[in-house]
Image (spheres, rainbow, N blue to C red):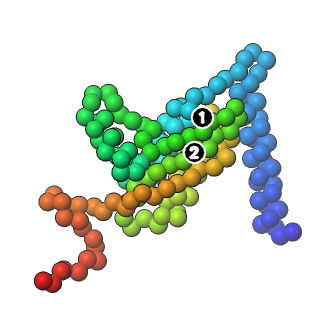
Amino acid sequence: MTAATQSREVSSAAQADTAGKELEKLASDHGVTTIADVVVSKIAGIATREVDGVHDLGGQTARVVGKLRETLPGSTSLTQGVSVEVGERQAAVDIGIVAEYGVAIHDLADGIRNNVISAVENMTGLEVTEVNITVHDVHFAEDEDGTALVADAQPRVQ
């Protein structure tokens, strides 16, 4: 067994012990704490938006509905683009994003996973079993007249 494998096993065992201790907080002799899906969705949505390189959450339909919702006072949706399944002790999260152009998508996905897992586990005590990420689109910076700006773009010859 290599040192890296031993280190991963020790780290996994430490995480399992920590998760087990946190899960004990959800049920005690004095009662049970139930965490609603919407709570986990909001935490995951906020944690995702905190990661640099995320332009927006949700697919095209969710973004259109979100834009309409923003026109109504007090109707900001923190759960747009986030779907969760919450059990008694575990949660699974699905997130749809629009990435900023130029960001390494695999690094962005790793950053989102780490941030979401950390936020959900720390705030709820639930074990996050998976964070699935779907990249629906890539956002390009635009100038005032709506023309896409790409640093290495060549002028079009007609």
Please state if 103 lies on the left or on the right of 122 as rendered: left
State whether residue 106 is above or below residue 89.
below
Q: Can you give x and y, in whole percent of width and height, for residue 141 in the image? A: 27, 61
Tell me: 141 left or right of 8. left
Q: Which residue is mark 1?
A: 123
Coordinates of residue 104 in the picture (x, y in percent): 47, 66
Name the residue furthest top. Answer: 30
Foreground pick, 6 / 35: 35
Q: Mark 2 and mark 1 in contact (Cβ < 8 Å)?
A: no
Q: Residue furthest front?
A: 61
Q: Which mark is residue 93?
A: 2
Looking at the image, which residue is at 52% across and 63% down? 107
Residue extending furthest toward the right? 1
- 92, 74: nearer the viewer: 92
Per the model, the C-alpha gap separating discs 1 and 2 is 15 Å
Say above or below: 21 vs 50.
above
Note whether residue 118 is visible: no
User: In the image, what residue occupies the spot 42% across and 65% down?
Assistant: 103
Disc 1 residue type (three-letter): Met
Is 7 above or below relative to 44?
A: below
The residue that appears at 32% across and 27% down in the rendered structure is 74
Is there any visible trace of residue 151 in the rendered image? yes
